[in-house]
Amino acid sequence: MRIDVITLFPEFIESCALVGVVGRAQSRGLLQVNTCNPRDFATDNHRTVDSRPFGGGPGMLMAIAPLRDALASVQQDSAQPAHVVCMSPQGSRLTQQRVMELARLDRLVLVCGRYEGIDERVLEHLVDEELSVGDYVLSGGELAAAIVIDAIGRLQDGALNDALSAEQDSFNAGLLDCPHYTRPVEDELGAVPQVLLSGDHESIRRWRRKQALGRTWLRRPELLMRAQLSASDRALLEEFRREYRAARTGGAL
């Protein structure tokens, strides 16, 4: 997969794309992350890419021409069509489902805004989709783009050393992930649940599923409303609820 990022700070994106899972995906030839700076397409001596908004108001807007030319350059660099996404707090909320859909594309272009935003005509005519990583405002789209690249990069076949890691991630099955433990078995902070030491794979699977259902109920109950739960899932969730309430009331149900 190829991802091109339109950004005024290419060094930030490039440094993020060199480390961790994304860096490994690139070194294995599974992912290619490129950057393109709109300043390279500015026509004045100051390499200006912004201008004051019509109607007044604070701040500056990214202008049409440098962004249009940067996008055209990136799209002409390959015969493969690209899906263009602008990172914006006004976009649709990024979800794991959307990440999985984007990860199946051959090419993606991420546009990073700066200042007070981007001229609306760019968004209307040159962008296919606006995406938000949350209901808050960042100084620019680069951090959001790095999040998208990381989320997509780890889903490329062969990017993770263990392919099951992605399957067990939070949100992958519509639920949060279960708790995880490693050595030592005993610590001043607590002990590893005995079921994980039992070697009984079915009991471990059942425990993990119950914990995932329970953790989702406690932390993100709205996810359960959308999840397709089996009769077994519902029984496990009710069991978790009883145990949780008993622990909160000192054993009295």
Image: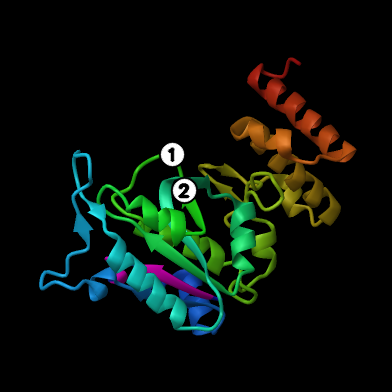
Tell me, yes or no, if residue 181 can be seen here.
no
Q: Nearer the viewer, residue 248 or 213?
A: 213
| Crowd band around label 1 with a 10 angstrom C-alpha radius: few (<14), some (14–19), many (20+) | few
For the point 59% across and 63% down, the residue is 102
Q: Which residues are magenta?
A: 2-10
Front residue of this view, candidates 49 and 220: 49
Question: Label 1, on which residue?
Answer: 135
Q: Is residue 247 left or right of residue 202?
A: left
Whether residue 113 is in magenta: the answer is no
Is 214 located above or below residue 35 in the figure? above
Q: Is residue 232 above or below residue 22?
A: above
Q: Residue at x 16, y 70 (%)?
A: 47
Alpha-carbon distance for marks 1 and 2? 7 Å
Image quadrant containing the C terminus: top right
Q: Secondary structure at mark 1?
A: loop
Q: What quarter of the picture does the N terminus occupy?
A: bottom right
Q: Nearer the viewer, residue 108 or 166?
A: 108
Name the spot of residue 104 as percent of width and height, x first. 64, 68
Asked whether, in this view, residue 177 is left or right of residue 150, the answer is right
Residue 8 among magenta residues: yes
Q: How are the colours assigned in the image?
A: rainbow
Q: Residue type at mark 2?
A: Ser
Give SS at disc 2: strand
Q: Are marks 1 and 2 in contact (CB under 8 Å)?
A: yes
- 65 or 138: nearer the eye? 65
Would you identify the image quadrant in which residue 13 lies? Answer: bottom left
How many numbered marks does the figure carry?
Answer: 2
Q: Which mark is residue 132?
A: 2
Query: Residue 188, position in %: x, y?
Result: 51, 43
* Residue 3 located left or right of residue 137: right
Q: Residue at x 64, y 61 (%)?
A: 101
